[in-house]
Amino acid sequence: MFKMKQLLLLGLSLILSIPAGAQFWVERDSDFTVPSSGISRFSIVDENVVWGIGYDGLNPNNNVQRFSKSEDGGETWDSGQFVLGEVGLGISDISALSATMCYVAAYPRDSDHQGGLWQTVDGGDSWTMLTTTQFSNSNSFPNVVHFFNDNEGIVIGDPINNQWELYTTQDGGATFTAISPANIPAPQAGETGYLAQKTFSGDSIWFTTSNGRLFHSTDKGMNWQVYDTPVSDFGGVDINADVSFGNPTRGILQTNDGTLYGTNDAGATWQLIVISGTGNPYGDNIAYVPGTNSIVSVGSDPDFSGSSYSRDNGVTWTNINTRQYVDVAFFNETTGYSGGFTSDQLTGGVFDYTGSVLTVDDSAFAKAVSLYPNPTNDVLSIQTDAPLDRIVVRSLTGIILKEASGNTQRLSLQDVASGLYLVTLYSASDTYTQTIIKN
């Protein structure tokens, strides 16, 4: 039920010898005092506040009940301890609402432990178990916690008696209600979830399973659908994957060998993406910059480590460097983080995005362009005050499907199959590319 790559000592030589990625990542001190510690999962509140779960980079099986928090946009970090009343509990997931309020899910590592949900209202100095979520079965195993706002949240656990154990709250955790089995498809034989394997956008949330399935809710966890994906297991030893959504319908799935699939229907169907460019995605974690076409991929495996980015929904990639990175999360186009390793006591352990390459194109040409409707059923309208030379429609693999002259204002896509495409407008001095969806 736990997915974490073995983070080998080999990574320490990379930490000491390779720059952190000029004009992209800046390495910060995570305030963890044990060498080779880092942050394995982030919860970003806003442009200033972010929390992260600590881990042991030399032996991920070691239990670490520590967190680190920044209140100044990642420049400085302060660590603390999850005091849950049982030092043997493992930390599953984290969801922060402010610098003072945060929720953490914990799972039992031994048969005599009881997992559940804890809350802090004093910045992590003390933690209180919220007994309003049951998780009282001896096999209860909380994996995911997410709060959509101060009041509405959800906790997701593995199946019990062939039913997923899910609880939602409408009052900040004062009370929780179990989701009826009628509202969520039943688990398959032996199917489980994974620690912190979730992604969310607005009121939508997704979680992954050991059977390669993706569960999806559009109403903050009240009702669910389930989809098959191109992978057989999201957290297996040989096969695993990560998924992220940039908006409630557009998502990306990355396998551990760097293969990418895209969806434009919230995960119901997936298309293989043939990548191009000078870089490549990596095999661990992937994250959309919310509301944009930009994606960042990271890897921690010493044989496949590094970070890279794409600005066109995963088609074209640029490498940043080949250091080891653990987890990646973005709040917007200027605020994002990735985990690393402390190279010695109090040095390193977290990376703060400080670049500008992910900023949405605000050139005069881009501002003058409007392509609508998107998604479209047939005709794509093209509106711009700038003179165009030509218009090109390409598949995600780069194959040109249509070309039109620059004076075209309505482009028929009737003979184009449903899917995700790139439309490029060419002027005498500039180009502009936008992803469009053909229904």
Image (cartoon, rainbow, N blue to C red):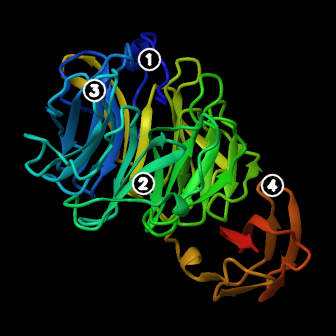
Q: Earlier in the sequence, mark 1 or mark 2?
A: 1
Q: Disc 2 designates what residue? A: 356
Which residue is the extreme one toward the right?
415
SS for dot 4: loop
* C-beta proximity under 8 Å, tags 4 and 1: no
Mark 1 residue element: helix
The amino acid at mark 4 is Gly
Label 4 Cα neighbours within 10 Å, binned few <14 / some 14-19 / many ≥20? some
Q: Tell me which label, 4 or 3, sits earlier in the chain.
A: 3
Q: Secondary structure at mark 3?
A: loop
* Residue 191 image position (x, y, % from top left): 59, 38
Which residue is denoted by mark 4 in the rendering? 398
Give whichever of discs 4 and 1 has the lower sequence position: 1
Task: Inspect the image, locate mark 2, and give the three-letter code of the amino acid beneath it.
Answer: Ser
Q: Which residue is mark 1?
A: 14
In this view, the mark in front (4 or 3): 3
